[in-house]
Image (tube, grey):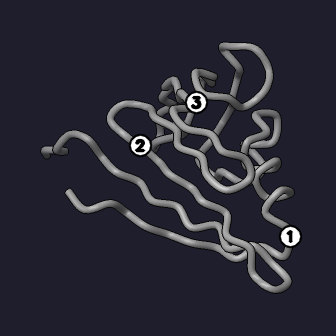
Amino acid sequence: MAPIVDSVEIARRPEEVFAYVTDVDRLTEWQQSLVSARRETSEGFAVGSRVAMTRRVGSTERTMTMEVTEASPPSRRRKQSQPYSRLTRPAPRSASTELPASTSIASKISG
């Protein structure tokens, strides 16, 4: 299945963008469907770090655990929560940072 790709340009340096998008305490500020996020491992953003994330899906709330599978601040991060994998790579621009993201779904969704 082809990945879902989106991108946004942010008027900040890559280091600032990376710090913001990996700060568990601020995830609900920019993820609209996210109700709460709670660390399951020690603070920081490193391979193996896990976060319990509760999202509003329609009229219900679903909790899943996200695990960091790749981290190379400030240029690359990958997180995994079955069946999804999401890769973000902040890219410097002249006065801003582009934040492209690619989401892959590992299993077929059937209706």
User: Nearest the camera: 72 or 16?
Assistant: 72
- Seen at 47% across and 34% down, the residue is 60
Label 1 vs 2, first from the N-terminus = 1
Q: Amino acid at mark 1?
A: Arg
Q: Amino acid at mark 2?
A: Ser
Mark 3 — residue?
54
Mark 2 — residue?
85
Q: Quadrant of residue 46?
A: top right
Where residue 8 appears, x then y in whole percent? 64, 73
Which mark is on residue 12?
Answer: 1
Q: Name the outermost residue toward the top.
A: 41
- Seen at 32% across and 60% down, the residue is 3
Whether label 3 touches label 1, CB < 8 Å: no
91 horizontally vs 11: left or right = left
Q: Could you tell me which secondary element the residue under label 2 belongs to?
A: strand
Q: Quadrant of residue 42?
A: top right
Q: Give the vertical position of 49 relative to 58 (above or below).
A: above
Label 3 vs 1, first from the N-terminus = 1
Distance of mark 3 from mark 1, alpha carbons? 28 Å
- Callout count: 3
Where residue 52 appears, x then y in whole percent? 60, 22
Q: Amino acid at mark 3?
A: Thr
6 horizontally vs 47: left or right = left
